[in-house]
Each structure stands twice: as structure tokens, then as C-alpha cells.
Image: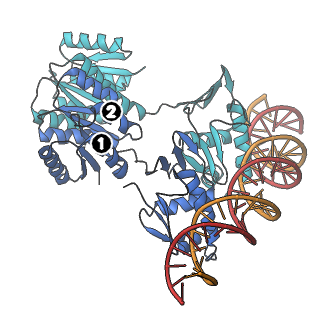
Chain colours: A blue, B cyan, C red, D orange
Amino acid sequence: MIKVLVVDDEPQILRALRINLAAHGYEVSTAIDGAQALRQAAAVLPDLIVLDLGLPDMDGTEVIAGLRGWTKAPILVLSGRAASTDKIAALDAGADDYVTKPFDIGELLARVRAVARRGGGEPEKPITELGDAVIDLAARQVRRAGEQVRLTPTEWQLLEILLRNPGKLVSQRELLHRVWGPSYDRETNYLRQYMAQLRRKLEADPSRPVHLLTEPGMGYRFRPEV
Amino acid sequence: MIKVLVVDDEPQILRALRINLAAHGYEVSTAIDGAQALRQAAAVLPDLIVLDLGLPDMDGTEVIAGLRGWTKAPILVLSGRAASTDKIAALDAGADDYVTKPFDIGELLARVRAVARRGGGEPEKPITELGDAVIDLAARQVRRAGEQVRLTPTEWQLLEILLRNPGKLVSQRELLHRVWGPSYDRETNYLRQYMAQLRRKLEADPSRPVHLLTEPGMGYRFRPEV
DNA sequence: GCGGATCTTGACGCGCTCTTGACGGGTCGG
DNA sequence: CCGACCCGTCAAGAGCGCGTCAAGATCCGC
């Protein structure tokens, strides 16, 4: 199922697009301003983005630049402005197509198919954000404030289990079994050791963790961004 | 140099496009009808095609279909017909963009850049830069400071796997399997041997590698230029 | 058959990771 | 109010993984 993020501040257009895209087999999520669009994109990792340029909070090219910073998903721009300079600016900022309102819904869907056809081949990166740290599990890479953060193999194993169960509590037993082996049951000092290390490397304030939480007597939990 | 094939039966439009594209660094070839377009495309193998739909000898979608039979090069359609049904037909036939005449030349160039950006990455640019070394994977050739650098077959295999996964960590198991075979799991001394050799031949300071990095206990990583 | 290049194999030292133990503070129940 | 429990933190020894050097084995063109 192809995931599409639709960004528009006009409710009726948003609704029309959602219905039409969903009717053609797309999985649709929506946002009504630029800030929400960027958050939503990071959360759902869409395969394609339909973006209205006339948003209340941000300039359209800024939103495009913000998306292009980390994703190559095709961006199809909607806009009421038909001037060539606007189109050129948006396309050179990284948009893949530009459609002026009012638009024909059938044509828009055809253009969506066209850009999806081309961009679809690329698998999307499963990237997790943890505060100001960006974690790429597939590439085994952590960036924080531009700097590269190095994790040891044991730290990766522990972190991966927690990140693959977002919001869910993982018991100490399960963590010990999956990282150290089935014969480890009560070595909770290992967990304390490595959780502290992870928090030191990833949390803004290691002594007051926001994302790597302890559930006393039970286990640990990764809490994603709210 | 990006090769563009322009197809239009109106001489003045053809001329205007040729001049403007050439001025922006494209290598331009032209055709004035559908049959010639297909012959020309097969001859010059363009990276991008600008195609007028109103050709005298063939229907526009037939030309698109004829091209799509063997090439994935982006096709940007020009047309005097603004009806949605025409656009939908062309896009679904395999076109990547659709611009109605009369068009703004600046906008057209921006759309050319947009589709070229996306299509250009796919046909592979087989050349990778690694510090002062230039690596051509297709030609199996490395130049460094003008000098030719020789790599052994095993070195090539190892280097190619890393270069085809830029930024991504490749585990020692995967490297061993793909270079030496599935029965090799723990012969990490092979990897140490050949990685050292590659660094000696490619890195500016082999003892302090910048691009061919070790992730202790996990594997190796090729880091492209920052 | 000979010589050079390439691939395999072994060994050693050093730095980093993992392991292990101990201490103190916080919380909860008795 | 006190003790048990759990967690965070620190410290230090053990062990492993990596880079490096060296030498024997194997393949190839001439």
C-alpha cells in the first residue's frame, strides 16, 4: 500500500483529496500546516507527498527544503499561484511536479501515478527520532546535532529491541534473553549499565530520560515523540 | 553532459528549445516527427526526452509507448491540448510531466531539471569519489592523483559491496558471504587483511581512514564525502 | 618450468568493550 | 521509622577484536 501525505489548510480540499486517494488504494495521512506536515512526515514516512504551498505558518519552499533534508519521496505541489517564478522556485527547491488550482481531480491522480511510478522503486528508510538524535537502524547510524555518535554492538542490540517496540514495555527478562542469551535471567546490573550508557549518548539530560524510560520492577520502554 | 532529445514539428519551437537547453549545458538532439523520434532515440540514447504530442505522423501516446518499450528515460510532454483526458492519457502511457502550450521557457527548464534530477540518479553514475581517488565501478578503474591504481579481484569485490551501500554499515558476515562464499563466517582475518590493503591504496592516511571505516564488532562502512 | 602477483594462514600487541563488584539514594511496605 | 528492594553510578580487571607484519601456498602468463 502506497502511503500518501496530503498537506492543505483548506478542509474541503483536504477532504476531497483524502476520499479520492483512498478510493484509489492509497493510504492517506493529512496535515494542515507546515510544522504539522514535517512532524507527520517523520512519523509515517510517506512514499509520496501532496503539498499545498499556501500554508498559514511557513513558506512553501521551506517545507520542501525541510522534507528534502532527509527524504527523497516525491513531492507534488498544489498552488493557487500560477506565476512561472513560483513554479520554478518550488521545482528547484526539490518538488517533482507543480499543479495550479483549480485542478482536475483526474489529472491530479494521473500525476500522482506518474511520480509514484518513478519514485516507488526506492525503499524508504526506517528512521527513528529520539529527541535531537536521529537513528537509522538499517544503516546502523546515529546522528546528533550533526555529529556522528558511535554505539557498541551490545548497545545497538539493546536499542534496536526497544525501538522496534515503540511505546511498549519490554521486560528485563526479555531484554536479557535477547541480548545475552536464554541463560541470563537476573543479571539486571547489565541492563542498568547499558541503559545508562545509551541515555548518556542519546538523551538530552541523561539523568532525566524522556524517551528511554525505566519501569521499576518491570522493564524498560521507548517513548517516541509526542 | 545530459543528453536531451527534443521532438516537435514546429521549427521555431524546436529552435527555441535547442538554444535554451544548449545554453544550460544540455547536449541536444532533435526530431520533427514520431518515426524520426524513435530512430533518433535509439541512436543517441538520450537521458531525457521532450516530446510534442501534436506530431503529423503518429499519435502522441503511440510515440510514448514506443519509447517506453525499451527506455526508462524521463519523458516531458508538450501539447497544445489542455483537456484533462489528454493529460491523463499521456501520463498513464508513461510520460513524466505534461506542459501545455504556450509555455514559459523558464518553467519548462525547471521541469526539465526536476525530472532529470529524479531520472538521472537511476541510470547509475558509476563514478565514486573517495578522497583524492576516483573510482569507476563499471570500468573497473581507479585513478588517484593522475596515476592509475591497480586493485586485485578480491579487492574489487569487497570495495564494490561497500560502495554500493554508501553510508550503510555492512556486517562482516555479509561481506564474507558475498566475497568468499556462504561457508565463511568467522574468517575476519581475511577482512582485516583486505581492508588494510584497500586503505593503503585509497585512503590519504591509511592508519586514519576517513571513508573506509571500521565499526568494531559489527562490520565496515563506506562514508561518502561530507 | 619459472617468476611474479595474489590469496591464504598464523601470530602478536594494543586499545576498547564487556563483565563484574560495590556503593548510595530513592521508594514502598511493614 | 526502619529495612528491603531496585535503580543509577563509578571503578577496575578480563577478554576480545582489530591493525599490522610476515611467510607459505596457489595461480597465472610467458
Circle 1 SS class = helix
Category of crowding for the residue at label 2, using alpha-carbon neighbours closer than 10 angstroms: few (below 14), some (14–19), many (at least 20): some
Q: Could you tell me which residue is drawn at 17 percent across and 27 percent down?
A: A81
Q: Amino acid at mark 2?
A: Glu
B65 with respect to B83 (left or right): right
Residue B86 percent coordinates (x, y): 12, 33
Residue at image mark 1: A117
Is any part of residue B187 visible from this angle?
no
Pointer 1 chain: A
Q: Nearer the viewer, residue A135 or B55?
A: A135
The quarter of the rendered structure image containing the C terminus of chain B is: top right
Q: Residues within 10 Å of mark 1 (few under 14, many from 20)?
A: some
* Residues at marks 1 and 2 on the same chain: yes
Q: Percent position (x, y) of residue A34? A: 28, 40
**In the displayed image of the protein, which residue is found farthest to the left?**
B83
Query: Quick one: quadrant of the N terminus of chain B?
Result: top left
Residue B40 showing in the rendered view:
yes
Disc number for residue A30? none
Mark linked to residue A62:
2
The residue lying at 37 percent from left, 26 percent from top is B47
- Taking depth in this image into account, of B167 and B129 the one nearest to the observer is B167
Q: Hey, what amino acid is under mark 1?
A: Arg
